[in-house]
Image (cartoon, rainbow, N blue to C red):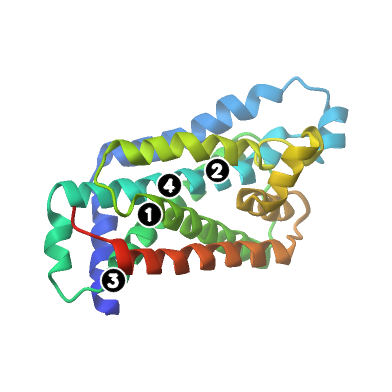
Amino acid sequence: MFQEFWVLYKRELKKTFRSIGVIIIMVIQPVMWIAFFGSSLTNVPSQFLTTFFHTNNYIAFLLPGELSVSMLFIGLFSSMSMIQDKRFGYLKKVLITRAPKWSIFLAKVGGATTRGLIQVPVMLLAGLAFGVSLPLSPLGWVEWIVGLILLGVGFSSLYLIVTMRSADWQLPNVIANLINLPLMFSSTALFPLSFYPTWMRYLSDVNPITYSAELGRGVILSGDPTIYYLGYLFIFAALMLGLGFVVARKYLTAE
């Protein structure tokens, strides 16, 4: 059964790397975020930045948050890939093989998450270009990358859970418009928790993006990430994966 998963997963990777346009966009998009949004607070007094952002370089604060947001948006690709396979008849061919439905679901999740990880070195290099200091903390870096993987797995699974039974091209975009912006702005990806009203703080406390962003900031700003953030992300990914397996087994169809 794992052989079937591996074959399907490799296909997802090939679909990504054979599209030059997609790769170019994946490289340019995060750099634009860092360059334009990250530079928006360049002329803010350093005392203000140090007080509220705990750094005098807003891009150092933004970088972990933007990487976390990128792992949110890659969930869209998992559902779009599933719908594309339905519309072109590929999924129908796969379902008549011995490949279990969970392997199809997991291959989509793995492909989307890997696609999101491609942006990590690009954004780190962009951060270095804008003066961000990246500390030497091997264990911290491992924890952060694992956290991003768990976040990508969780959101890719969530998108597939919502769109598994559909073959409508528009549904993933509708779902993205519904959940992506609220999740991004109710987390601490872009701004510190102290900026938010009380009701948004409650949302931020359960938002997985917050935990991923804070885990990364622990690496970049202090070199000492908080390990329980990783535990929260593991629970989130495990819940979404488990629910996704159940939904795939019961409701995944070729049309």
Which residue is under mark 1?
A: 160
Q: Give the CA distance from mark 2 to mark 1.
A: 18 Å
Q: Amino acid at mark 2?
A: Val
Check disc 1 and give the amino acid type.
Leu
Q: CA distance from mark 3 to mark 4?
A: 20 Å
Q: Reading the chain from its start, which is encountered first: label 4 or label 1? A: 4
Residue at far front of view: 250
Q: Position of residue 171 (x, y in %)?
A: 34, 39
Where disc 4 sits, the SS reads loop
Q: CA distance from mark 4 to mark 2?
A: 9 Å
Q: Which residue is mark 4?
A: 74
For marks 3 and 2 on the same chain, the one whose residue lies earlier in the sequence: 3
Viewer-proximal residue among 184 and 10: 184
Taking the spot 46% from the left edge, 46% from the top edge, the residue there is 119
Which quadrant of the structure image shows residue 25? top left
Mark 3: secondary structure: helix
Q: Residues within 10 Å of mark 4 (few under 14, many from 20)?
A: many
**Does residue 167 sit above or below 139 in this rendering?**
above
The foreground one among 247 and 108 is: 247
Residue 5 disc label: 3
Q: Is the residue 64 above or below the residue 1 in the image?
A: above
